[in-house]
Image: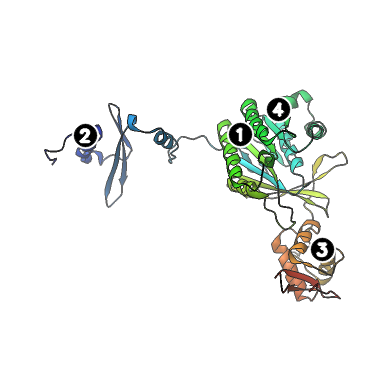
């Protein structure tokens, strides 16, 4: 029973009392209830289980809500929120990839085929299929922003690679691919031009080659955060996929993207693709190292023809396997392998040897390398030792090999 001293000085209090009065009638409802009273909107959330009944309410005057409160409320997501489905632009090996509204990273060492892979992507955007890439939607509009190469190099890629792969009239290519070379501009102008280009062209796919030229210092965490926020906002606003090209660290054993901007891109990217050049096999490898959804079922291998055009090739035989698919590590094969990885030396730092083994000798991953090291130690082909001062691990061939300490 309400006390006589309770005054309804505020509409919110009055309505709250009224809702409590109707509680028994509301218990039969399992749906959210919205009651509108003049300028007042009352939100009622019903939580019902077998043991109890909770009525949680908050009376809020729309006029009393701040701008930030309205903005926050507009961003709320519930299981019933009406949102469009995620839309992949491409498929690779029957797996969707490169989603609208998301950031993607394309990384690798210098000359590892990053731009070549993106040329395949741009070609597929125009004609539908190119090598391992299949377009999911109607012909896409592509915005390619080149900040690293000369204008002549950008044109050669368009004319001699993409146009040759597409085998279509130049006019059709020009209607689908909008290429801009921003090399030589200041970073502030480049950042502004990137936003102007995206807002003007309204592309489905953006190739930003490379993102490091939009900041003054790749190790500046503040600049890295700001550029990521800007690109995420543009991707959401224009519902496009923005592919960002960035180099990996120079060390052969370090596959992380360079600087604070690389760390931030790794954190924000929906997918990360890594490009490698396998020198021993004279071919290129593209791996999807990160995906927030389904990862690719296999890696993409290609080589360049005499005309400089990419073509698919078979997966290289990195090491012989037995009938069960296990690596074969006989002594002769191990001796040959480590002699090749040592490159004429009798000793080498563990990480350096691993980098050469993975780049030049066809070792697929770190686990395989560790298995080979273990088998070689067991067969007396090599031994490991720790440097007494630096604590670095060295590997030395047992046949007349000496350590430098």
Classed neighbour count for the residue bearing mark 4: other residues with Cα under 10 Å, few (<14), some (14–19), many (≥20): some
Quadrant the N terminus occupies: top left
Task: Say which mark, if any, is on residue 240.
Answer: 1
Which label lies toward us, 1 or 2? 2
Residue positioned 87% across, 65% down in the render:
344
Identify whether 376 is placed above or below 144.
below
Residue 400 screen position, x and y as percent: 86, 76
Q: What is the C-alpha distance between the residues marked 2 and 3?
A: 81 Å
Give the secondary structure at mark 3.
helix
Q: What is the C-alpha distance between the residues marked 1 and 2?
A: 48 Å
Q: What is the C-alpha distance between the residues marked 4 and 3?
A: 46 Å
Considering depth in this image, is 65 or 339 the residue closer to the camera? 65
Task: Say which mark, if any, is on residue 176.
Answer: 4
Of mark 2 and mark 3, the one earlier in the sequence is 2
In the picture of the structure, the residue carrying the numbered disc 3 is 341
Q: What is the C-alpha distance between the residues marked 1 and 4?
A: 14 Å
Identify whether 152 is placed above or below 347.
above
Classed neighbour count for the residue bearing mark 2: other residues with Cα under 10 Å, few (<14), some (14–19), many (≥20): some
Of mark 4 and mark 3, the one earlier in the sequence is 4
Residue positioned 59% across, 48% down in the render:
267
Quarter location, residue 163: top right
Residue 333 screen position, x and y as percent: 83, 67
Examine the rendering and report whether any part of residue 87 can be seen. Answer: no
Residue 43 screen position, x and y as percent: 32, 36
Whether the residues at callouts 4 and 3 have beta carbons within 8 Å, the answer is: no
Quadrant the C terminus occupies: bottom right
Residue 339 screen position, x and y as percent: 85, 66
Which residue sits furthest top? 171
In the picture of the structure, the residue carrying the numbered disc 2 is 14
Q: What is the C-alpha distance between the residues marked 4 and 2?
A: 61 Å
Examine the rendering and report whether any part of residue 92 can be seen. Answer: yes
């Amino acid at each position: 029973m309400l006390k006589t001293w309770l005054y309804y000085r505020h509409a919110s209090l009055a309505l709250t009392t009224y809702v409590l009065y109707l509680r028994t009638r509301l218990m039969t409802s399992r749906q959210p209830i919205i009651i509108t009273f003049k300028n007042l909107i009352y939100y009622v959330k019903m939580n019902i289980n077998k043991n109890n009944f909770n009525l949680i309410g908050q009376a809020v005057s729309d006029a009393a809500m701040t701008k930030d409160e309205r903005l926050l409320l507009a961003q709320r997501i519930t299981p019933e929120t009406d949102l469009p489905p995620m839309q992949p632009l491409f498929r690779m090996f029957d797996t969707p990839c490169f989603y609208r509204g998301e950031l993607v990273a394309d990384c690798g060492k210098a000359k590892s085929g990053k731009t070549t892979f993106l040329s395949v992507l741009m070609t597929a955007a125009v004609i539908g299929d190119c090598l391992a890439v299949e377009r999911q939607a109607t012909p896409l509009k592509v915005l390619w922003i080149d900040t690293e190469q000369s204008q002549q190099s950008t044109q050669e890629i368009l004319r001699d690679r993409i146009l040759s792969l597409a085998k279509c009239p130049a006019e059709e290519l020009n209607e689908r691919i909008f290429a801009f070379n921003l090399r030589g501009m200041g970073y502030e102008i480049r950042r502004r031009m990137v936003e102007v280009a995206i807002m003007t062209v309204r592309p489905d796919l953006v190739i930003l080659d490379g993102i490091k030229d939009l900041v003054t210092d790749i190790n500046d965490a503040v600049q890295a955060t700001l550029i990521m926020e800007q690109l995420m906002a543009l991707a959401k606003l224009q519902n496009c996929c923005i592919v960002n090209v960035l180099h990996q660290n120079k060390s052969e054993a370090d596959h992380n993207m360079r600087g604070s901007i690389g760390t931030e891109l790794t954190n924000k990217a929906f997918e990360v693709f890594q490009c490698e050049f396998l020198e021993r096999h004279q071919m290129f490898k593209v791996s999807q190292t990160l995906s927030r959804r389904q990862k690719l079922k296999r890696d993409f291998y290609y080589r360049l023809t005499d005309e400089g055009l990419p073509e698919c090739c078979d997966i290289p035989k990195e090491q012989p396997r037995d009938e069960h698919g296990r690596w074969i590590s006989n002594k002769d094969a191990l001796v040959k392998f480590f002699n090749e990885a040592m490159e004429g030396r009798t000793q080498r730092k563990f990480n350096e040897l691993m980098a050469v083994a993975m780049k030049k000798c066809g070792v697929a991953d770190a686990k395989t390398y560790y298995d080979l090291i273990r088998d070689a130690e067991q067969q007396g082909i090599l031994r490991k030792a720790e440097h007494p001062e630096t604590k670095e691990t060295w590997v030395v061939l047992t046949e007349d090999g000496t350590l430098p300490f």
